[in-house]
Amino acid sequence: MYWAITVGAGVTAVAAARWWSRERERDARRRELLALSEDDDATSTAHLSRGLAELVRQARAVRHVLATPLAYWDTPLAPETPWGRRARCDAYDRAIGEARRTLWEWLLLFRRLDERDRLVLLGLGLSPAPFYAALFRPGVFDRSDDLWEEVLYPEAPDLARVFVELRRTMIALRAFEATLLSRVTDPYRR
């Protein structure tokens, strides 16, 4: 009987340690992504053209959307049913799909810029290339290689890799915004 109590206490301690570790990792990721998605409301876009100001506003929105997918995936402490796993994978896939769609729509704004705005971006050394790379890099945001995965127990996302990619893209977006917002306009040219 003593042995059963000791084993039960050991299992409980292991589960508690696993829970604590998971919560710390999740909270650290969430804090960092939320910090990267925060806005600098004091920064005005009045000195930018309409197209560039829209590009900055939408970049802020993209950062917010990129911060959400990891909130839809928590590693369970106990084994889960295939149906519960499928529901969690579906919620994650929808969030990642929304993040990709938002990033794609932001990239389409570059095509609508006039020649003058494109020259401004070129002069500042800004390009959409890193964002296209993030969007099309194989396997970055996907849970599995099979788009129409029909398995009983779906593959979990690689949270570490997804976190690194989301963070890298959000940092690049923030740097893009900061560079564009710090642009000083020439008062003698219009």
Image (spheres, rainbow, N blue to C red):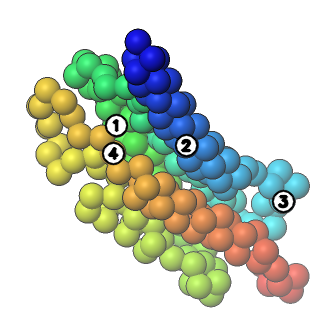
Q: Quadrant of the C terminus?
A: bottom right
Residue at position x 48%, y 61% from top? 164
Q: In which quarter of the image is the N terminus?
A: top left
Asked if residue 129 is positioned above or below residue 152 in the image, the reply reads below
Q: Which amino acid does label 2 sit on?
A: Ser
The mark that comes first in sequence, 1 or 4, is 1
Which residue matches tag 3? 43
The mark that comes first in sequence, 2 or 4, is 2
Spatial CA distance of label 2 from label 1 is 25 Å
Asked if residue 66 is positioned above or below residue 46 in the image, the reply reads above
Q: In this view, does 48 lie to the left or right of 73?
A: right
Spatial CA distance of label 4 from label 3 is 36 Å
Q: In this view, does 40 lie to the left or right of 152?
A: right
Which residue matches tag 2? 21
Circle 1 SS class: helix
Q: What residue type is labelled 4?
A: Pro
Which residue matches tag 4? 157
Q: Which mark is residue 52?
A: none
Q: Is residue 138 left or right of residue 147?
A: right
Which residue matches tag 1? 93
Nearer the observer, disc 1 or disc 3?
1
Q: Is residue 166 left or right of residue 161?
A: right
Q: State the image coordinates of residue 100 (x, y, percent, origin top left).
A: 40, 49
Circle 3 SS class: loop
